[in-house]
Each structure stands twice: as C-alpha cells, then as structure tokens.
C-alpha cells in the first residue's frame, strides 16, 4: 500500500482538477442582464460596451491564476534578466503573427518549463517504483527536463516564425504581380494594396491589411510600409518596400517598379531552391559513402 500512495494522491489531484475544469467550462443558464442585451447595439459609440464585449474568460482556473501570478511574475523577471533584451523575441512574435507580448511569451515559457518538470517528476516516481535511482540523478533529470521545456517553447516560436516568413516570401511575387495589374488598370497604389488585402487569403495579404488599417487611421502610406518592413525584416519584402517608397519620392512609374521587384523575387526563390537542392544532394551522398 505504501508504494501505491503517491499514485493515489496523483490520481486524486488529476481527478479533482479535471472536474474543476469541466465545471468552470459549463455555460451559465441565468438570464442575461441589461448591459449584456444593450452592449451590442451601442458598440460603435461606446468604449465601455466594446470593452465589455471583448472580455472573455479563457482561463478555466482563475484561482490558480491568482495564486501563481506572483511566482510567475518573479520567474518572468528573472528570465528576462538572464536572456537580456527582448527585441529578438518581439521580432519573432511579430514574424510568427502572434499578438502576445514578450512578457506573455516569457510566462508561457515558464509554464512549459514547469510542465516539463512536473512530467519529469511523474516519470521519476514511476521509475523509482520499478528501479530506485539515486536522488542526484533524479534531480538532474528534472532540471534537464525543465530547461528543455523552457527552450522548447522558444524553438517552437522560431520554427513558426521561420515557416511564416517562408510563406510570405513565396506569396510576394504573386502579390506584386497582382498589384502591377491593378496599377496598369488605372488604380492607385493604395487601392491596389486594398484590393489585394481584400480578395487574398495569404499571410502577406493579412499584413497588407494592417497597412490599410494604419492608413485609414491617418498614418501615411510610406510610413506604414516602412514600419511593416522594420517589423518583419523579410529581405525580399524590404527590397520591394524600399523600391516603392523610392518611387514615391522620385515619381517613377510604380507598375514598372513592381514588375521588376516581382521578377527579382522569383529569381531569388529560384536561387534559394538551387542552393537547397545542392545541400540535399550532398546530404544524400552521406549514406552512400557510409555504405561503401
């Protein structure tokens, strides 16, 4: 019975937490109050109504959130102090298309590290029941798992940012050619960008939609494009935006500039494909050489 006591405690905690999650996610059956019925009709003129409708209870464990908030805040400050500046993380979050802040991302990293450490403790308990291990070895295993969970979240962010950057690079030539057709048809550059962002569904079209949103709020188009370039730091997109802003200043026909940039983007994609094929060809020779 002594060996089953840790399992009983663990299963009881898991059962209680699961029941708490189910109860917290159960919808309320009470009648909506007056503000819930009126807010959707005054959302355009009332900031309080917008704030009320934007509220969402995504955290099913508010009590745990309140209890763990001081610990997570201290861990977040410690992580930021160890890793230094947050400019790189902020750029990766922007490239990945995530709306969370750097502080929220650090909190996610701490949670991943805690989850990995908890999983390592569970594995250690199971391993101890089968084959007892020295205490230093178990402690080292938990520390390694904690570090792996922390770095794993950052690695996942890097992969997501790199994948999204590749998708935008592939979409850039098509977007530029479509904008060239719109300009050749007599539309302005702002109308061409608006048309692309409205009828397209890619990652780059979503970023151009943010540019249109900035322009609608009064930001000049050149400044909005320059800010997009500095945030994404995608080489092909940066070159295209630099040529577009330069054409604004010099009065160069934008259709020819965009057509040339689209061709340059396609040539760049071909060059990258050839480089990748060369690397893969060398990698394919490694098993052959080992066999020989």
Image: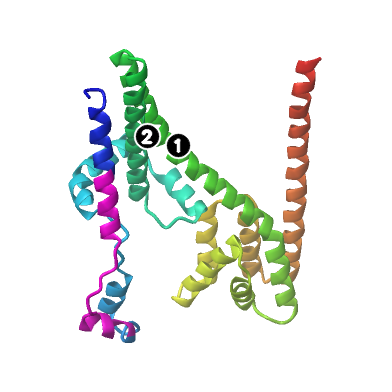
In the rendered image, the residue lying farthest to the front is 1
Q: Is mark 1 on a helix, strand or loop?
A: helix
Q: In this figure, what is the number of numbered marks?
A: 2
Q: Is the magenta stretch mostly helix, strand or loop?
A: helix
Q: On the rendered structure, is 16 left or right of 180?
A: left
Q: Which residue position is annotated with label 2?
A: 116
User: Is residue 178 shown in magenta?
Assistant: no
Question: How is this picture coloured?
Answer: rainbow
Spatial distance from mark 2 to mark 1, Cα to Cα?
A: 10 Å
> Of tags 2 and 1, which is closer to the observer?
2
Whether residue 118 appears in this view of the structure is yes
Q: Nearer the viewer, residue 78 or 64?
A: 64
The answer to whether 69 is drawn above or below residue 260 in the figure is above
**Within-10-Å neighbours for mark 2: few <14, some 14–19, many 20+:** many
Q: Residue 284 lies in what quarter of the image? A: top right
Q: Which residue position is annotated with label 1?
A: 152
In the rendered image, the residue lying farthest to the right is 292
In the rendered structure, which segment of residues is drawn in magenta?
15-40
Residues marked 2 and 1 touching at CB (< 8 Å): yes
User: In the image, residue 292 lies at what x, y percent?
Assistant: 81, 14
């Amino acid at each position: 019975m002594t060996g089953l006591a840790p399992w009983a405690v663990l299963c009881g905690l898991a059962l209680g937490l699961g029941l708490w999650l189910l109860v917290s996610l159960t919808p309320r059956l009470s009648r909506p109050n007056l503000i819930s019925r009126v807010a959707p009709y005054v959302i355009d003129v009332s900031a309080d109504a917008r704030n009320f409708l934007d509220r969402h209870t995504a955290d099913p464990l508010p009590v745990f959130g309140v209890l763990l908030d001081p610990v997570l805040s201290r861990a977040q400050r410690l992580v930021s102090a160890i890793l230094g500046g947050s400019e790189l993380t902020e750029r990766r979050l922007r490239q990945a298309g995530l709306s969370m802040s750097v502080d929220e991302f650090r909190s996610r990293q701490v949670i991943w590290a805690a989850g990995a450490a908890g999983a390592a403790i569970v594995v250690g308990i199971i391993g101890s029941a089968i084959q007892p291990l020295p205490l230093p070895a178990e402690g080292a295993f938990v520390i390694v798992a904690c570090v792996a969970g922390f770095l794993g979240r950052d690695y996942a962010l890097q992969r997501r940012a790199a994948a999204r950057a590749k998708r935008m690079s592939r979409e850039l030539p098509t977007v530029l050619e479509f904008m060239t057709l719109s300009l050749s048809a007599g539309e302005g550059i702002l109308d061409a960008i608006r048309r692309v962002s409205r009828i397209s569904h890619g990652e780059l079209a979503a970023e151009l939609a943010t540019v249109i949103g900035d322009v609608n709020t009064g930001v000049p188009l050149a400044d909005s494009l320059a800010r997009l370039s500095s945030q994404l730091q995608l080489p092909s997109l940066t070159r295209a935006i630099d040529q577009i802003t330069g054409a604004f200043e010099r009065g160069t026909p934008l259709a020819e500039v965009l057509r040339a940039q689209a061709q340059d983007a396609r040539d760049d994609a071909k060059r990258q494909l050839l480089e990748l094929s060369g690397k893969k060809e060398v990698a394919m020779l490694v098993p052959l050489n080992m066999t020989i």
